[in-house]
Amino acid sequence: MNTSRNNILEIIILALSSFFYIGYLPFIPGTFGSIAGILLFYLIKDSAVIYALFTCICIIIGFLVTGEAERILNKKDARCIVIDEVVGILLSFIFIPFDYKLVIIGFLLFRILDSLKPYPAGRLQNLKGSLGIMSDDIIAGLYTNIILQVVLRLVSFRTS
């Protein structure tokens, strides 16, 4: 009975960490994880409270499952773990109004920053377990959000 319970728990961990198996797509799973995050942004964009709460829940779930997924897969930050990209994109757009141009800019910025790993993301990524997996995408998402906030203010100042 314990074996089947462990198997079910592992299936749940892998499903959540791969964001319902999006991470198992054969190419660019991180990009598809980011796109899934954008779809979530679109679906819950109309309520800042629900968006912030959902983002917090995803962060918590990410920290709970990614380290375990890494252990199950026996691979550091395995490609199929993409809940970190979902979280990063959600953070990128928190308190940002929905606009297709901003979504494209934010997506590109997030993917670039996630690849470049600006300080302290590169260092944090080397940490073991969930902290190492989640932190670089959280940093990339926060940096993206800051840049988008600045862009929004500059554009609004120029038009007024």
Image (cartoon, rainbow, N blue to C red):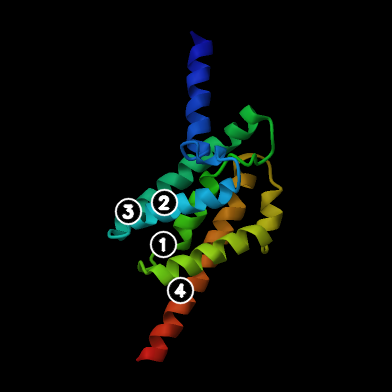
Image vertical order of residue 74 relative to residue 103, above or below: above
Disc nearest the viewer among 3 and 1? 3
Q: Which residue is mark 2?
A: 55
Q: Residue at x 42, y 49 (%)?
A: 56
Q: From mark 3 to mark 2, how far is it between C-alphas?
A: 13 Å
Q: Are circles 2 and 1 on residues that touch, CB within 8 Å?
A: yes
Label 3 vs 2, first from the N-terminus? 3
Q: Residues within 10 Å of mark 4 (few under 14, many from 20)?
A: some
Q: Secondary structure at mark 2?
A: helix
Q: From mark 4 to mark 3, how far is it between C-alphas?
A: 21 Å
Residue 146 position, x and y percent, is: 51, 70
The amino acid type found where label 1 is placed reads Ile
Residue 109 position, x and y percent, is: 56, 66
Q: Are circles 1 and 4 on residues that touch, CB within 8 Å?
A: no
Which residue occupies the extreme front position in the image? Answer: 26
Image vertical order of residue 25 relative to residue 86, above or below: above
Label 2 vs 4, first from the N-terminus? 2
